[in-house]
Amino acid sequence: MSRDIWAVPLQPTNFNIILALLGGFISLFGLVSFLLKENYYLSEALIALLVGVAFGPNGANFIRPKDYAQCSLDGVSDADCQDNLNAITLNFSRLVLGVQLVLAGVQLPSKYLRTEWKALSLLLGPGMTCMWIATSLLVWGLSGTSSFLHALAVGACVTPTDPVLSAVIVKGKFADQNIPKDLQNLIVAESGANDGLGYPFLFFALYLIKYVGSGATSSDAGDAMGLWFAYTWAYTIILSILYGAVVGWLAKELLHWAENRNYVDRESFLVFAIALALFVLGTCGLVGTDDVLACFVAGNAFTWDDWFRIETEDDSLQPTIDMLLNVTIFLWYGAFLPWDEFGNSSVISTWRVVVLGLLVLLLRRLPWVFLMHKRIPQIVDTKQAIFVGFFGPIGVSAIFYLFITLDFIKEHLSDEDGVARSDVKDLSELVIHGLSIPLGKLGYLAPRRMGRVLSKSLSDEPHLVEARRKIPIIGKYLVGGGNGDVQPRATGPVVILDSRPLHQPSGVLTNAASDMHEADISAGTGTQAHDESGTTTPRRDRDIRFLDEV
């Protein structure tokens, strides 16, 4: 039957809806991003998560994860639907972690993993072990599970420090003004390395559950330990480190070779690290090794000589792509996660989940970092020890490991029909409720201001200016005695001449002139510059810098 040609051709498809929602949210958030982050201390991850909840199946139902997983097709059972959703979430988390970890490795100084191996060894060795044991004891005590091995598995999932949420504090102008650079680098390196080192802790518990648990067909701890050393350590960890180092070094040499011969343009040069992340993720996924750890090692090996990091430190392409991925994945988490199941559990009650989240926040990391801080040169005083100890975000990496656990239960602890072994049924529910731990810790990342107590490298002038800006009436009397010695902060973008060096394909850095002149901000126009010989040079391009960059 033919359609009325005058009918409005509405197309409310899932694709159009999700594009409109995603673009609208990012645009609206971008309009007030500085206000929300600096005045109300709300992180973009928390806001995206809440928007995902509001527009997901538990809210307006504009984001429909089950439709994307083809759950409405004939012949797709509820179990198949859930498997599809879990696979989407796991692979999406892998993608975000892989890109974030390559960028984390790239931003570290030259040869950082080698020069700072002592401090990192303390945080990744005894530090991670204590975090794992402490969290597992809390889960075991509050969940009521009879098996400590189950608690060890959940504790291992939330042990790594999440690199995605770490970027909220340790990247950008805020971090540069308030957190010492060596402390930033330490946090970045730790969050990047320990994110991939969660495998040994997790599979230590899972292998013991399989071979020694109450439902095991044969009690053989030797098989469990054999798999743990041979597969987890040798194949998964050591192989991924070697592979990441080799791929990162080869990528660096190839990019040097192409750039020296003018074979690579600026756009391809800037996106090279992200392409490297995708390649490492895909190849490691094909052979089943630790892709997230390989990405971090590859990123650091890629910039081992500091060349790529210095060339790209003033470009915003990589942080922009990183931000888009982060916002998108937390929108997905908000729409996908089973919020209705958190309050209906036979394993752990809601009030116990809340108490567990608070205790994990206080006891998972803070005591152990505080005990070790005198042996870590980057942590110079008690305030910094408390900050580093309190700063241990749990987020994408925890959800990544929780879904790896669910996948292991399905593949190795269930029968042919997908029914979990009797002794691990509680583990599946406990893992689902373990998602509440990372989600509960999203909020405390919002007060980015707490890092200001650490600021020792800069003067107090930026903070005095901000005090007057936030308290416009009496601020001038509280700061500077009201004599006008502190200039008010600009209320809009500041237009200045672009003084950054231009990247030439041959690798030569040049400046248009050695002396830079201020732009006429009020008029918004630039003038031609004259050098000593009297020749006139064209007006240079303008660069707009915003409030969080001045």
Image (tube, grey):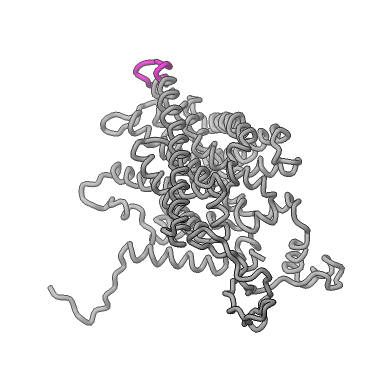
On whether residue 219 falls in the magenta region, the answer is yes
Residue drawn where x is 30% and y is 46% of the image: 81
Residue 242 vertical placement versus 90 (above, below)? above
* 527, 507: nearer the viewer: 507
Residue 512 vertical placement versus 310 (above, below)? below
User: Which residue extends farthest bottom?
Assistant: 523
* 17, 95: nearer the viewer: 95
List x then y, in percent, for residue 122: 63, 32
The image quarter in which residue 135 lies: top right
List x then y, in percent, for residue 203: 44, 29
List x then y, in percent, for residue 534: 67, 81
243 sits left or right of 81 in the view: right
Residue 545 vertical placement versus 47 (above, below)? below
Q: Main secondary structure of the magenta part?
A: loop
On whether residue 115 falls in the magenta region, the answer is no
User: Which residue extends farthest front?
Assistant: 533
Residue drawn where x is 76% and y is 51% of the image: 456
The stretch in magenta equals: 212-223
The image quarter in which residue 509 lies: bottom right
Residue 398 visible in the current orientation: no
Count of marks overlaid on the render = 0
User: Which residue extends farthest left?
Assistant: 1
List x then y, in percent, for residue 199: 47, 33
The image quarter in which residue 393 lies: top right
217 sits left or right of 292 in the view: left
Residue 531 vertical placement versus 389 (above, below)? below
Q: Quadrant of the N terminus?
A: bottom left
